[in-house]
Image: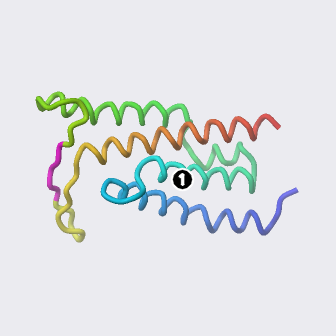
Amino acid sequence: MTSVILTTTARLLHPVLLITSIFLLLRGHNEPGGGFSGGLVAASAFALHAMAHDARQARRALRIDPHVLIGVGLLTALSAGVMSLAAGAPLLTGLWTSVHMPGLGEWAIGTPLLFDVGVYLVVVGITLLIILCLSEAE
């Protein structure tokens, strides 16, 4: 039995939760937030979708296997450390570059953000793998 209220709420909250998770990810280097908390919020969007529908539809909405998210996240976080080694600095030393984005101005982007993106992907992947496996076991 599906609840109209739950499915409507899930449909409305899904994009809001995903946008909030991206905000937390991007804000997290200098203020509270980051890859871990952003990843948990993103995973909660798909967990809510799984509760409103079922795990199969949540996997379809995710479009990527959680195992792939975990692997890509680990490689992304590892690449943040390897970049600093390649530059002759100690492992996980922050390297920064300035990027001009049309309409958004000048942005400083560095390896800490790359590491946070890796953590974000790993947290989303592991959390969804656990949640979806448990919901499919019913």
The residue lying toward the viewer, choosing from 124 and 103, is 124
Q: Give the side of residue 49 with respect to residue 32, left or right.
A: right
- Residue bearing the label numbered 1: 42
Q: Secondary structure at mark 1?
A: helix
The residue lying toward the viewer, choosing from 85 and 65, is 85
Q: Give the side of residue 34 with respect to residue 94, left or right.
A: right
Quarter placement of the N terminus:
bottom right
State the predominant SS element of the stretch in magenta: strand
Q: Position of residue 28 (x, y in %)?
A: 37, 55
52, above or below 129, in the image: below
Q: In the rendered image, which quarter is residue 88 located in?
A: top left
**Outermost bottom residue:** 103
Q: Position of residue 38 (x, y in %)?
A: 47, 53
93, above or below 33, in the image: above
**Outermost left residue:** 88
Q: Position of residue 93 (x, y in %)?
A: 21, 37
Please report the residue visible at 42 percent of the width from the left and 56 percent of the height from the top.
33
**Outermost right residue:** 1
- Please tell me how crowded label 1 is: few (under 14), some (14-19), or many (20+) other residues with Cα within 10 Å: many
The residue lying toward the viewer, choosing from 128 and 102, is 128
Any magenta on residue 98? Answer: yes
Please report the residue visible at 38 percent of the width from the left and 45 percent of the height from the top.
117
Question: Which stretch did the figure color magenta?
Answer: 95-99
- Amino acid type at circle 1 is Ala
Q: In the rendered image, which quarter is residue 135 located in?
A: top right
Please report the residue visible at 62 percent of the width from the left and 36 percent of the height from the top.
129
